[in-house]
Amino acid sequence: MKPERNTLDYLLLILKGIAMGAANKVPGVSGGIVAFVAGFYEEFIYSLQRINKTALKLFFTGRFKSFVRYINGSFLAAIILGMLVSFFTVSKLLDYLLINYKLYVWSMFFGMIIGSIYSISKRFGKWNLKSISFLLLGTLVGLGISFLDPATENDNLFFVFLCGIISVSGMTLPGLSGSFILIIIGNYVLLLIDSVNALYDTFTEVISGDYSFLENTARIRMLQVLAVFTTGSVVGMVSFSHLMNHLLQKFKVQTIAVIKGFIIGSLGVVWPWKNTVYKTAADGTFLVTNHNEKIIENYKRFIPELSTNTLTAVGFIALGILAIVTLEWYGHKQKITT
């Protein structure tokens, strides 16, 4: 039974979608963690997996109200709207903060992931040998992904489509960061920076009455890449949701144990004290895109010395933990009152 919602509930869902979208943009952070901790993960997966043959039949026979009701459309619309708003607004702010206050932003996310681990642990039942083994499996996979070396960029449209399918793993599987996986397979800058900037520039030009982009082959190629990537993301989101819904129904304890392991493993990616290593050309200069974005190759992590900056970063870690614990408390309180 899907919960009845009022206008305030939908505004809160949009805000959660914004948070989910912002988290998906940050390498190492999973938007699915936001959904899991905020208490709407299972409804999110349930709603997505309702996009099936029955839903398509309702849609193409013109029974739109039944279609929206069948797929829990108002809920999905609020979440997706929030993610779209985030994609073009909050994520830009996040880019600025990551450039100018990198240590504190990573510290905040590190704390939020620790808080997420605590929150999920509270919901977990009794541990046994099987669930512990699945936890260790998820942790090892998460850590393994964290320390892989990235591949080179590839704009082949079939590969871009596969990237779209893979990139939504962060929304449907908490703890696996879709954006970090895009770094690993070499297409983070192409798909989450260059193509998005191309779309933004195109919108800006069209609004001002400038259609010169139609003669710009590089721009058209970027728009094609974005369209294929988006299509792959939609296909991946629906496909993964069917898989996750099945796993949560048949193997809930084991699935949550693996998810918790992925989240623990992701701590290796968001460790705040790290130096970014960028790809360089043969002459020693940084490789850049058309938008002067350096291409990330990897991270070198280190143990910090005691200093004011370190103590401030620890404070942000505590703030991140507090934010998640507060969110979890609020979600629990809402369940009690409804």
Image (cartoon, rainbow, N blue to C red):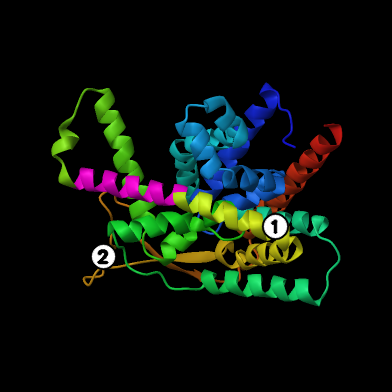
Q: Mark 2 points at which residue?
A: 285
Which secondary structure type mostly characterizes the magenta part of the structure?
helix
Considering only vertical position in the picture, is 37 above or below 155?
above
**Quadrant location of the N terminus?**
top right
Which of labels 1 and 2 is toward the front? 1
Q: Are marks 1 and 2 in contact (CB under 8 Å)?
A: no
Q: Mark 1 points at which residue?
A: 248
Q: Which sits in the foreground, 217 or 270? A: 217
Task: Point out the stretch of residues depicted in magenta.
Answer: 218-234
Distance, label 1 to label 2, CA atoms, is 49 Å
Residue 73 appears in the picture as rendered:
yes
Q: Which sits in the foreground, 162 or 190? A: 162
Along the polypeptide, which appears first: circle 1 or circle 2?
1
Q: Quadrant of residue 309?
A: bottom right
Q: Which sits in the foreground, 170 or 56? A: 56
Q: Which amino acid does label 1 sit on?
A: Leu
Considering only vertical position in the picture, is 153 above or below 213?
below
Name the spot of residue 132 as percent of width and height, x first.
76, 73
